[in-house]
Image (cartoon, rainbow, N blue to C red):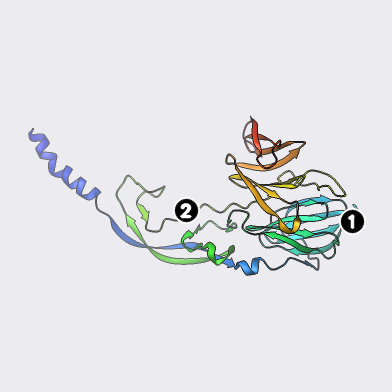
């Protein structure tokens, strides 16, 4: 009993200290967003003079044309009449573009949150036919550095985020005792919690064909066209988009899927969705509402 009484003051002191929190100021470096207003984003897209490839992304073939994405900036158009020497004939300035898909004489592209239909009747004079606004999730581009994003500065009403600038700020940090209760930092609780997660960039592609059919996309496609439907794979769902009238495209449905799916490819009345650990097969018996019919898993790979 005496030994318990002897250590009681220490126990009381420990409990008292464990409930204390002090604030200190720490200088931190963050990525702060730069914006395009929605008015800037939605300026009509038209052909301009060709420019050299700088940071090419996806590639797409349709008849005698090759489309090469310039990551998050636009699309280069090549005339492939002479396959041994494709000719760069134009450039499309498309902010936030990642991928494309073609049906007949219409090129469908993503532009951040919008889907845009472009007329390919004259490949040297491509023009915008229609636009479906806010059809894709709001996305954030890569930062290109290891600093955290200040999400408190991300405001969708200002427009789309096109880039970042670095800002150093002094912020209050709350010191707390061990063991930690807030994330991976042993003794610090950020008064404004900031994570290192970056936005996901939706992408796209397709089945082969010529004339009035669809084109051929790459193995990392996230768009595909089947008949009058464009299926766009995002990080959480399949967007089912009606393209019967290219001047008035619109989202018909949204089908939830598992996370981690990266690619989409059509075959007959099926959609194959690939991930690093397997494949999901959907039936298009009802084209508006694809139904999961099978899955196949394999060892994790790239």
Q: 289 or 221: nearer the eye?
A: 289
Percent across and percent down for residue 98 are: 69, 55
Q: Earlier in the sequence, mark 2 or mark 1?
A: 1
Image-based side of 153 in relation to 278, left or right: left
| Residue found 77% across the figure and 47% down from its top | 217
Residue 76, above or below 259: below
The quadrant of the rendering that contains the C terminus is top right
- Residue 239 pos. (x, y %): 64, 47
Asked if disc 2 and disc 1 are in contact, CB closer than 8 Å, the reply is no
Callout 1: SS: loop
Q: Position of residue 57 (x, y in %)?
A: 72, 54
Residue 85 is marked as 1
Residue furthest right as drawn? 82
Categorize mark 1 by other alpha carbons within 10 Å: few (<14), some (14-19), many (20+). few
User: In the rendered image, which quarter contains the N terminus?
Assistant: top left
Q: Which of 11/249 is in front?
A: 249
Q: Residue at x 40, y 48 (%)?
A: 183
> Toward the viewer: 12 or 74?
74
Give the side of residue 227 with respect to residue 231, left or right: right
Res 123 seen here: yes
Identity of the residue drawn at 90% across and 52% down: 83
Residue plotted at (63% across, 46% down): 253
Q: Which dot marks residue 195?
A: 2
């Amino acid at each position: 009993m005496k030994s318990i009484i002897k250590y009681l003051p220490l126990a009381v002191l420990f409990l008292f200290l464990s409930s204390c929190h002090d604030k200190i100021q720490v200088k931190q470096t963050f990525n702060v967003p730069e914006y395009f207003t929605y008015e800037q984003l939605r300026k009509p897209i038209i052909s301009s003079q060709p420019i050299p490839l700088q940071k090419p992304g996806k590639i797409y073939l349709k008849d005698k044309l090759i489309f090469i994405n310039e990551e998050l900036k636009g699309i280069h158009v090549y005339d492939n009449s002479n396959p041994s020497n494709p000719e760069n004939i134009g450039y499309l300035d498309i902010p936030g573009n990642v991928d494309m898909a073609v049906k007949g004489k219409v090129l469908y592209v993503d532009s951040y949150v919008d889907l845009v239909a472009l007329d390919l009747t004259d490949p040297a004079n491509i023009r915008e036919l229609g636009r479906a606004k806010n059809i894709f999730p709001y996305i954030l581009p890569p930062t290109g550095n290891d600093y955290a994003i200040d999400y408190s500065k991300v405001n969708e009403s200002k427009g789309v985020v096109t880039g970042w600038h670095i800002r150093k700020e002094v912020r209050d940090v709350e010191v707390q005792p061990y063991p930690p209760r807030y994330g991976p930092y042993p003794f610090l609780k950020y008064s404004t919690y900031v994570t290192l997660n970056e936005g996901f960039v939706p992408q796209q592609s397709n089945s082969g064909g010529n004339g009035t059919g669809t084109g051929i996309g790459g193995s990392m496609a996230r768009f595909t066209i089947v008949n009058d439907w464009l299926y766009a794979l995002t990080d959480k769902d399949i967007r089912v988009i009606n393209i019967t009238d290219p001047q008035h495209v619109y989202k018909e449905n949204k089908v939830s899927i598992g996370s981690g799916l990266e690619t989409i490819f059509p075959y007959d009345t099926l959609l194959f969705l690939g991930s690093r650990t397997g494949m999901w097969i959907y039936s298009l018996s009802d084209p508006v509402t694809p139904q999961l019919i099978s899955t196949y898993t394999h060892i994790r790979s790239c």
